[in-house]
Amino acid sequence: MCTLVWFKRDLRIFDHPALHHAVGLGRPLACVYVVEPGLWAQSDASERQWDFVRDCLQSLNAALQGRLIVRCGEIIDVMERLRGELGVTTLVSHEETGNRWTYLRDQRVAAWAKGQGVDWREIPGSGVVRRLDTRDRWAKQRDCFMRQPQVDAPSFEPVEAPSHPLSSAAQLGLIPDGLQERQPGGRDQALSLLGSFLTERGRTYRKDMSTPLQGATACSRLSPHLAFGTLSVREAVHATAERQREVRDTRDGWSGSMKSFQSRLAWRDHFIQKLEDEPELEYRCLHPAYEGLRGTDSALQTAWEKGETGVPFVDACMRSLIATGWLNFRMRSMLMAFASYHLWLDWRSTGPHLARMFTDYEPGIHWSQTQMQSNTTGINTPRIYNPIKQGGDQDRDGIFTRRWLPELADVPLMYLQTPWEWDGAGSLTYPTRVVDVSEAAKTARAKIFGLRGSAGFRSEAERVVEKHASRKDRGRRFVRDPLPKTAEDDRQLKFDL
Ligand SMILES: Cc1cc2nc3c(=O)[nH]c(=O)nc-3n(C[C@H](O)[C@H](O)[C@H](O)COP(=O)(O)OP(=O)(O)OC[C@H]3O[C@@H](n4cnc5c(N)ncnc54)[C@H](O)[C@@H]3O)c2cc1C
């Protein structure tokens, strides 16, 4: 009789409730990670994500005394083979809130386990609540999970079994995607980032998080580690709470920044909970009135994907994302909003490109945010970012824009975000803008607000509020989600047409 721990997006052994549970069963215990070619063939998967995961698996293997069993193949074949080899009677994993592919895969695993008499136990590992009956009690349940002590790394000797070498990205059919500055994965990297953020980098977090240049160091950069589980959210929450106690009475920026960071960790669970409660939001508009509203246009989409729309700040952000795999929240929102409003493209055709470009792709946050920034939830205030204004506000000296758009090196700063207005524009090799920014925004706004008065719109919006909105927002007609907690958060979230 053997217990098998199946690692998925939880690549650590510290504060790992599922592993702790499995060790507590007191039987021989084996640990497996399954490289699933089907998963890596999905439109949201990319080379950069796999390379990050590879680092994390090497680090996990070291933590498991070199006994992580890596197998590659279709999940049921792998599970059935391991059952035969090791005599697996219990399968333990964390509760994963993944994409549609993993959701359906888990249903197949559940059917297989039932058929073979294998007891599959899925153990919660974050503030996301499975089979939540009502959002009314969610915040309390999350806080309760976060207040519990972290679980120590268990001491045990994993069962040995043959392990496959880790596939290369090319073996999984993943093509090089333009990444130049790769963020390394692994537990040591996660702890080092958490430490440097809480003691050195995070002081100006609140002030600098929205600027593309300073944001790259003032933000924690923990997102891929949280997404693939080299760090648990509870570890981050506890370490931040401790830091908050230390800096409580300071006035140098630390106190406010730590508070803002703590709220973002809560937003994380809040957004993932939406996908957990309604998996269809990955492929269906949350509010049905928005179905069929937008279309596709391959020329516009290609220009947006390559950073060649002719709108400098949009292109600089996209090219930076392609090269680094990361972008701050404000710039992600702007890229998405530009695609959805100015280019009027359907979020289902643009969302996968961003998912692939994000090393930290997390389906629950990604699809909820993609819909929110495209205004297909029916409950959020539309945020139609003006990329010209954003460029001026967030990149005052033009350093970021020039870094990613060398074609604009000679354009004077006052025309950097609007090169078409510059006398010398004719000599530029930079693309002509694909839309007139203010005209496109005006048209989009009229279409979006026009829909809001349609029959049945309100009642469906109420359903979405009931199921998904933060309870602080209740009673408001159209809500921002989540509601800013402080005036500073409010300023940061303010949309500006
Ligand atoms: C269209 C769009 C798609 C996004 N897709 C993803 C995604 O696939 N994966 C992902 O991790 N984040 C996503 N985000 C949220 C956010 O932009 C990133 O979490 C953040 O930029 C990551 O950098 P960081 O770890 O330095 O963040 P920090 O600001 O240091 O925040 C710490 C952590 O809090 C969480 N967090 C921060 N902001 C948000 C937010 N607005 N909503 C939910 N959780 C948040 C993340 O886990 C993040 O790692 C998306 C945002 C938008 C607008």
Image (cartoon, grey):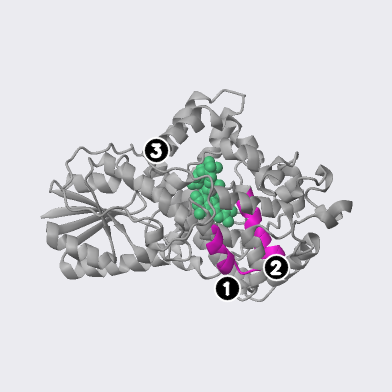
Distance from disc 3 to disc 1, alpha carbons, whole Å, reads 38 Å
User: In this picture, which residue range is highlighted in magenta?
Assistant: 331-354
Image position, residue 418 (x, y; %): 81, 52
Image position, residue 67 (x, y; %): 21, 46
Q: Mark 3 and mark 2 in contact? Answer it, CB < 8 Å.
A: no
Label ID, residue 448:
2
Distance from disc 3 to disc 2, alpha carbons, whole Å, reads 41 Å
Q: Is residue 349 left or right of residue 395?
A: left
On the question of residue 135 being in view, the answer is no
Ligand 1 closer than 8 Å to label 3 CB = no
Quadrant, the C terminus: bottom right
Residue drawn 52% across the image and 58% down it: 355
Q: First in sequence: mark 3 or mark 2?
A: 3
Mark 3 crowd level (few <14, some 14–19, many ≥20, 10 Å Cα): some
**Can residue 102 be found in the magenta stretch?**
no
**Can residue 343 be found in the magenta stretch?**
yes
On the question of residue 245 being in view, the answer is yes
Disc 2 marks which amino acid?
Ile
Distance from disc 1 to disc 2, alpha carbons, whole Å, reads 13 Å
Quadrant, the N terminus: bottom left
The residue that label 1 is drawn on is 288
Quarter of the figure with residue 4: bottom left
Disc 3 marks which amino acid?
Glu
The residue that label 3 is drawn on is 235
Disc 1 marks which amino acid?
Pro
Mark 1 crowd level (few <14, some 14–19, many ≥20, 10 Å Cα): some
Q: How many marks?
A: 3
